[in-house]
Image (tube, grey):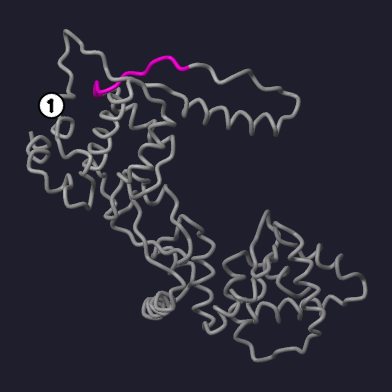
Amino acid sequence: ESGIEFWIQSSGVEEWRRKWVVMLRSNAVTEVNEELLESILHIVRTRVSGATDKDIKEGLGPGTPDKVRIDAYNALLRRRRLSLKTRDGQVIYEEVSAEAAAKLSGLSVEEHLVYSLIEKSGNLGIWTRDLRFRSGLQQNQFLKVLKTLETKRLVKAIKSVKAKNKKFYMLSDITPSKEVTGGPWYSDQKEYDSEFILVLSSHLAAFVRSQKKVSIREATQYVAKSGISKESLEVEHIASLFDIMTYDGLVEEIEAVSAGASIAKSNTNSARKQLKQDESETIASRMFKTKTPDTHLHSVLPEIPCTLCPLQSQCHPGGTINPASCEYLTEWLDF
C-alpha cells in the first residue's frame, strides 16, 4: 500500500505532515498527464466540502491506475494546487486557486508548512508556541520562517482579549473573530473601553429624550448615521447598551407592539431560519423611553457630565473634542 492515504492511516496527521515535507523535498518528480491533473482539479472543484480519494477515483473511472493517480496528487501538491485536510479520519482534497498557488509558489517547504498550519487556524489564529511545536522546526529556523511570511504579507500577528500577553498568527486577509477582538467594546490595545461605552450611552440617552420613545432598531440606525462609532454596531450591541442604561436608571423598557403571527412547523429548516429572524426582530423591536423620575431614588443621569454638556454632539473618540481629554469626565470617573 502506498500514497497519502497510507501515511494518514499508519502514522497519524502530525507524522503525515513530516512525511509530506519529505515528499515535497524529493527531487524525483514523475511525469504526469496535464489533462489528468485538470480532471482531478475539476472533480475536487465540483464538491463544496472537498473530495476524498474514493470520489476522485470514481470520477476518473477504472482506466486510471492507482499509481498514476497518486503521482498526480503529488504533482498537484508540489504545484500548491491541492491542499489536504482530514475529516472523520479521511483525507480530504481541496483545490487551491491558481492565484493563491502563485502567491505561495516562492515559499520553501518549511514556510509552506507553517503557512498551512496558520491557514488551518482560521479566524481564531494559532498561538506562537503551538505553531512552533506543530511545525517541528527549531526556534531560530521557526522565527526566520515567520519573519519571511510576515514580510511577504501572507500572515499577521494578533493579540487576543483572552490572552493579551500571547502572540497569535492568522492569514493576513482574515478578519479576527469577535472571540479574539472582544467586539466593539474593546480598544485596539484589547482593553475594555469604558469611556467609549459611557459616551455612546450618553448620546443614546439624549436621543431617547428627544424622541420620547425609541426602538433598538431606531437607535442602531441613529448610531450608524451619527458616526459616533468607528465600528459597525449591530442591534445586539445596542440592545446590550440599553440593558446597561436600564440598570443605571437612564432609560426604562416599555411594551412593544407584537410583530405578527407564529410560524408554521411543517418545514423544520424553514422554521429554524424563521425563528432566528423572529428572535432578531424581537430584539430590534424592543422599545425604551426616558426613565420616569423616582421620588425615592436619585437618578444617576444628572450626575454624568456628558448628559448636560453643550458640546455633546461634537464629542467622540479621536475627535478634537473627545472623552479622553475631558477634565470633567475624568474627574467624574475618578470619583
Which quarter of the rendered picture does the C terminus lie within?
top left
Give the residue displayed 70% in from the left and 66% down from the top: 93
Task: Tell me: 106 left or right of 249.
Answer: right
> Residue 247's x, y, as percent?
28, 23
Extreme-top residue of the structure: 295
Pick whichever, 261 or 117, lies toward us: 261
Task: Tell me: 152 left or right of 211.
Answer: right
Residue 293 higher or lower than 131, as above or below: above
Per the image, label 1 sits on a secondary structure element best described as helix
> Residue 167's x, y, as percent?
34, 62
Residue type (three-letter) at the residue carrying disc 1 = Glu
Segment colored magenta: 248-256
Give the residue displayed 30% in from the left and 44% down from the top: 228
Residue 212 in magenta stretch: no
Extreme-bottom residue of the structure: 27
> Residue 143's x, y, as percent?
37, 76
Pick whichever, 27 or 199, lies toward us: 199
Which quarter of the rendered picture does the N terminus lie within?
bottom right
Pick whichever, 199 or 171, lies toward us: 199
Q: Which residue is mark 1?
A: 303
Give the residue displayed 82% in from the left and 79% down from the top: 36
Give the residue displayed 26% in from the left and 48% down from the top: 191
Extreme-right residue of the structure: 63
> Residue 220's x, y, as percent?
40, 36
Residue 133 higher or lower than 268, as above or below: below
Pick whichever, 162 or 95, lies toward us: 95
Q: Quadrant of residue 133?
A: bottom left
Residue 265 higher or lower than 21, as above or below: above
Task: Tell me: 95 left or right of 285.
Answer: right
